[in-house]
Every structure is written in C-alpha cells, then in structure tokens.
Amino acid sequence: MTLEGNGAHVPVVIIGAGPVGVTAALLLARRGVRSVVLERHQDVYPLPRAVATDDEVRRILQAAGVGEEFATIARPVKGLRLLDARHRVMAEFPRSEDGYHGYPQTSMFDQPELERLLRDALARRPECELRSGAEVTGIGPDTAGPVRVTYRDDDGEHRLWAEAVLGCDGANGLTRDAIGAVWEDLRFEERWTVVDVRTKADVRCWEGVDQVCDPLRPATFMRVGEDRYRWEFRLPDGEMPVRELVAPWLPPSYDGDFEVVRETQYTFRARIADRWLRGRVFLLGDAAHLTPPFIGQGLCAGLKDAYNLTWKLARVLGQGGDERLLDTYESERKPHARHMIRLAVAMGWAMTGGQDGAAVLRRRLLAAACRIPALTAAAGRDLSPSLTAGPLVRRGIRRGLVGTHCPQPWITADGRRTRLDEVLGDSFAVLTAAEPWSSLDTVAHALGGRAISVTDLGDDGTLAAWLHSGRADAVVLRPDRVVMDVVPAGGRDFTDTAAWAVLLHTTRSLLPPRRTADDHLLRSATR
C-alpha cells in the first residue's frame, strides 16, 4: 500500500516498528485493515534485547502469519532453576515442549532476527506500509473525528489523518503524553548489567534459565542460541570485568573465542500507565507498562496487547462494531498486565533476596518453599490468569471456562495434520461437544464464524476433555481464542447473547445458514 500526498487518510497509523507495532499491523492486515507504520530508525536495531517468549505469544505469531518462520529461530527452554550463591540447585521448574497453546512453554530467540522476519512479512502485505526514518512530532487534536499525526523525515514535515492510532513507541515515546497518561509506580527499581556473549566454549548450562539467588550479587543466565549466551547481574557499574563475572560458567582458565556482543546497563522498573486510550489513540507494549524481566513477560505483554486490540479495532472499523467495544481493550488488558508486573516483582524479590536487612530471611524462606513439591509444580504452570468479567467475558456464578483460552491441539482436517487455529481462521467460532444445533448455527453465523463439533476435528481428545472439565456443551471463542460465553452442560443456549451482541453488531444476521451437501464442516473451514 502506498499513500500519496500530504494529509492522506488511512484507517490506522502505528507509531513504532518494533515487534509490537509490526505484529499489530500484520494482525490488522489479515482482517483487511490498512495501516501505515511510522518508525524513526532506518533499520532494525541490530543488538539483542528481548530473548524469551511463551507459548501464548507463539500462538499470536502464528495468527500474524509468521509462526513457521519463528520456529526456525526459536530455541525451546527446559525451564528455570534457582541456584544458591555457590550455584547449587535449590529448585527446578520444568517447562513443557508441548504447552497449552501448542508450542513450547518457553522459547529463546534473538530480537533482531524476530524483527527482520516480521518486517519481511509486512513487506508481503499490500495492506501495510512501513515508513522508516519518520519521527512522529505530534498527535491530535483530541476530537471525535480522525486523528492527525504529524511526522518529520528527510523530505520535511508530513501529516496523516487516521481513524485510529496505535502508540507502540516504547517507554519514552510521545503517545502516552499525547493522551494525558502518567506512570503509576509499582515500587520496583533496580539497576542491572546485561551482557550478551558469543562463544564456542563449553559453557556450563542445562538448556534452561539459571537464577542465582544471591542477595550480594544476584544473576540470571540463559543460552539464547547455538553459540549465544546472556548474563544479567545486579551490581554497581564497572565493579568487575565481564570475564571475571562469567568465569563460573566457563571452563577453567578458558582463553578461547569470547565476543561480547553487547554490554549495557538497564534499570528494571515496574510501572503501568494510568490510562491506555483516549478516543481512538491507544497505548501498547512498553508505552503502557514496564515489567521487570524475572518471568520473561516484557515483550510478551506487548504482543498480547496487540492481539487483544486488533480484532476489536477491525470489528469497529469494518464490521459495524460498537465504539464501546474498544473500551474493553483497557478493561481487559490493564488488570492482566498489572497482575503480571506484580508477579514479576514478587519473583524478583524472592529470587534476588532484595537489598535490605530481611534478605537473609527471604532467602531461607525461599529455600524452604522450594522443597515443597506442590509449590514447585504450581510455579511451572502457565502464568497467565483468566480475564476479568466484562461485556466480552460472560462469567456467571461459576467461573468455569469463560475468560480463559481455548487449548490448541493438533487436529486432522482434509486428511492433513494442522493446528486448531488454522481451521478456525481469524474470526469467531463456536465449538460444541456434539453436532451443532440450530441456535448455535445462528450465533456462529451472526458472528461471522462457524459452529464446529470437536468430534469432527480429529484431535487426541483434548478439546472434548476441555469442554467436559468446564461442564460446557458449547463455547463461543473470540478471535483471540478467549472463551466469551458457554452453554453449560444440559443447556440449550448461551446465557445472554444480547450483552455482547450489541457491541459486536451481530443482529444483522438472525437466520441460521442453510447447510448443503458440499458444505462439509472442515473442508470449508480451512483457510
């Protein structure tokens, strides 16, 4: 897509071409929404930053159309170990290579490689245009009409008019100020040294993450790639040379190749913006929240923002969705982000011991807790909580499946093995424990999706067991694979479709679709 002239109108302007911004553009493109991505840098930042992702985010990358490409650069991780100051293992939290979302629960990657494959995918989409070297200088005015975005490049000043603006411009971007948002400090700030190294040395590692729980010098270590490693240390600037810091992991007296790819100082903070949107200007990723790295959710949270917002925005811009649908972005994502930040802070204090007089006591309590099998097993499970109740999360007396994600098993469609989401497509879906009845067909058709019996999907029984565990005969899945509503076991209809139907503008199609002989469920569902 190419926009000519100054002052052109575009459905969506995205500020920032990092992983969050480009993923948002790809997700919008798959729903037919055009966007312009403005990035002040000319190319991908070449040095490593984020290195970890979870299986939920890998499912999001699949939805963005880059799942297979990402698999070629990702390295599954066995889990997390807590070590004492002498590097003795206190506890081990294993991570599965077949997680709930159909991918390894934790994977390592190199952020520049991820950004390049995302930009390659963006270049293949005619709905998207990336403008590099474009520094945004203003967003506004705050009116009911299109939003004006001004930017500067080598050719001078330019402006665009957008139906929506996505601020993916990081912690120091201008979008947060433009909507009048301020940081809420969640009371964690520590300065760490981060070192990325490339070496062919026989580095002592276990293909997972090591957290050294030493209050005097806490550290984190992980293998990122075939010959790539990362160390993180909490220590004053310049306290010790890198080779001395990493010596416990290297062979004795090693003097072979050892390339420091990057050594930098980071201040790990815990913050969340007090507001995430004004009108149709939204904050995503680090513009909305800052998470300490102890549970590997910094970049992950931003991609989850993009997945939550983009289908709603596409619904409003192109499918008659109610404007109030966009308000659910902040009401759903903000509590989730706050929970993850607090969890990261708690993990950070527990693992590093803190810097106060109670550090020794905390370390002893942690060591005792690590000897309780039930606690270590719980820590190894998925960290992501269910969404809170709201217009798109129809939660009754029992919480059940509503607000949680649907699992993604491998299934068989048209004689080939594929992942569930490839069959469900990019829209809503109704999954049933038995052959869909007419009212379910009506709901699915009104949402622009299909009603599918899990018995026709040829999986290993995962979906049937999941429905049974939630005492549900059917569920409505949102495009982001969150359960919006359920038909309880023995019921015949969803609890109150009017609550979400008005937001989604589903009243256009009230009659169930007519089935024909060639309308085989799976054959026509794959796209």
Image (spheres, rainbow, N blue to C red):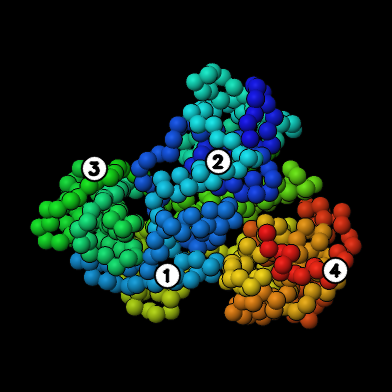
Residue kind at label 3, given as amino acid type? Asp
Gap between marks 2 and 1 measured at Cα: 34 Å
Residue kind at label 1, given as amino acid type? Arg
Gap between marks 3 and 4 measured at Cα: 69 Å
Query: Which residue position holds label 2?
Result: 123
Secondary structure type for disc 4: loop
Q: Are marks 3 and 4 in contact (CB under 8 Å)?
A: no
Camera-side mark, 1 or 3: 1
**Quadrant of image for the N terminus:** top right
Query: Could you tell which of marks 3 and 2 lies nearer the N-terminus?
Result: 2
Does 408 sit above or below residue 469?
above
Query: Which residue position holds label 3?
Result: 237
Secondary structure type for disc 2: helix
Query: Which residue position holds label 1?
Result: 95
Q: Residue at x 63, y 62 (%)?
A: 422
Gap between marks 4 and 1 measured at Cα: 44 Å
Gap between marks 3 and 2 measured at Cα: 41 Å
Q: Residue at x 46, y 73 (%)?
A: 378
Residue kind at label 4, given as amino acid type? Arg
Q: Are marks 4 and 2 in contact (CB under 8 Å)?
A: no
Front in this rendered view, residue 311 or 233: 311
Camera-side mark, 2 or 1: 2
Residue kind at label 2, given as amino acid type? Ala
Query: Could you tell which of marks 2 and 1 lies nearer the N-terminus?
Result: 1
